[in-house]
Amino acid sequence: MNRPFATIEENGSPLKVVVVGAGAMGRAWLGAVEASPLVELGGIVDLDLAAARASAASIGKPDLPVGAGTAELASDVGAQAVINVTVPGAHHPVTTEALFAGLPVLGEKPVAATVAQGLSLAAAAEVTGQLFMVSQSRRYNAQLFAAKAQAAGLGRLGILSADFFKAPHFGGFRDQMDHPLLLDMAIHQFDMARFLLDADPVSVFCEEFNPPWSWYRGDAAAVASFEMSCGQRFIFNGSWCSPGHETSWNGAWRLGGEHGTVLWDGENPPTSESSQVRTDAGAAGEQPAVADPGAEVHGSLREFVLALRTGAAPMGQVHDNILSLAMVEAAIESAASGRRVRIDDLLRRSYDRAVLDERRPDVAAVLASWSVDGSFSAARLGSARLPIH
């Protein structure tokens, strides 16, 4: 569903933005902003002003305006949009502040720290009429788009699997997280699966565990089986403490359909093999033409600007993206309970929490308008692919 939002007329000038968050990811986004002709960096926001100044100096702009308040700095420099690269716990307050200051937001994943907070942000986007887009950066990969295009020739799709095996020694907060793999990484593969299948999650059964040699405090390995809305199954099998023959950071994928299979190792162009006899004039082995989505954060930044200029709905618009975080929360709940979790059930509980926690009357009114007899269905998020249970 295309949810309308305010656009910014093209006037020949770059879109002026402020970046909120001066950590490692913030600096990565500063590089993307500096490399893009579509945007102009107006300033950096961080509670740690010294970190903000250091980030400005690192890109050769020591005199760039910095500040601790998003709306205040954006107003001071005449910014037209915000890029939110704060930690997940700050996503909700920072994005809310920006939206109600009349500023569209491009935010790092996840949409928020919880699905309940994500629902609050979706309602805030409706109240303000501003675009809130989540950057699921690994969707922006030409090889992923090629894999999806190849799968289109395989008839009905049945099963998708993603293997993810890495052994990174991060140090710091990831080593101490309760669910390091599912919370910090698997959302990428879960979101990519939704893209490849053009489907959304219905339920999940997940087992989470920690190998005895793991250097993580929390469970660093998981196997999850999702039922998807068109009847397919998506299987995620992963570990963050699996040295040797490591996969790509994108994972290694197999997509099986009625007439064949697509393989993608996450780093090289995908391949496909089909049993279907070609009846068109194309040569055997011909690959479908694929538009270039751009590369990772550069691609999501480009789509964000294009959406604001044209009104075209981007990938990652908040209502749709909530379902990727819901897959993570449902997988964690399934692992803890030992039972299959229905996505609608999780969303309804999250909706109740969002209503209970909401402090803005205007956002609360929008949330209330979503309920039917006090309940909430995933279909309200706007995906025609999800059945109402």
Image (spheres, grey):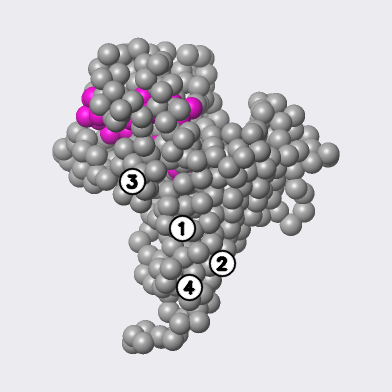
Q: Secondary structure at mark 4?
A: loop
Relative depth, front residue between 182 and 375: 375
Name the residue beneath numbered marker 3: 383
Where residue 62 appears, as percent x and y from the top left, is 44, 22
Which dot marks residue 258? 4
Count residues near mark 3 (Cα–Cα under 10 Å), then give few for <14, some for 14-19, many for 20+.
some
Among numbered discs 4 and 1, the one appearing first in the sequence: 1
Name the residue beneath numbered marker 1: 231
Q: CA distance from mark 3 to mark 1?
A: 15 Å
Relative depth, front residue between 293 and 96: 96
Q: CA distance from mark 3 to mark 4?
A: 25 Å
Q: Amino acid at mark 3?
A: Ser
Q: Amino acid at mark 2?
A: Leu
Q: Is residue 176 magenta?
A: no
| Residue in the picture at 58% in, 58% down | 161
Count residues near mark 1 (Cα–Cα under 10 Å), then give few for <14, some for 14-19, many for 20+.
some
Relative depth, front residue between 224 and 290: 224
Q: CA distance from mark 4 to mark 1?
A: 13 Å
46 lies left or right of 289: right
Looking at the image, do the residues carrying marks 2 and 3 touch, with CB atoms under 8 Å apart?
no
Name the residue beneath numbered marker 2: 263
| Residue in the picture at 46% in, 47% down | 201
Where residue 313 appears, as percent x and y from the top left, is 27, 45
In this rendering, the answer to whether 211 lies above or below 231 is above
| Residue in the picture at 35% in, 12% down | 359
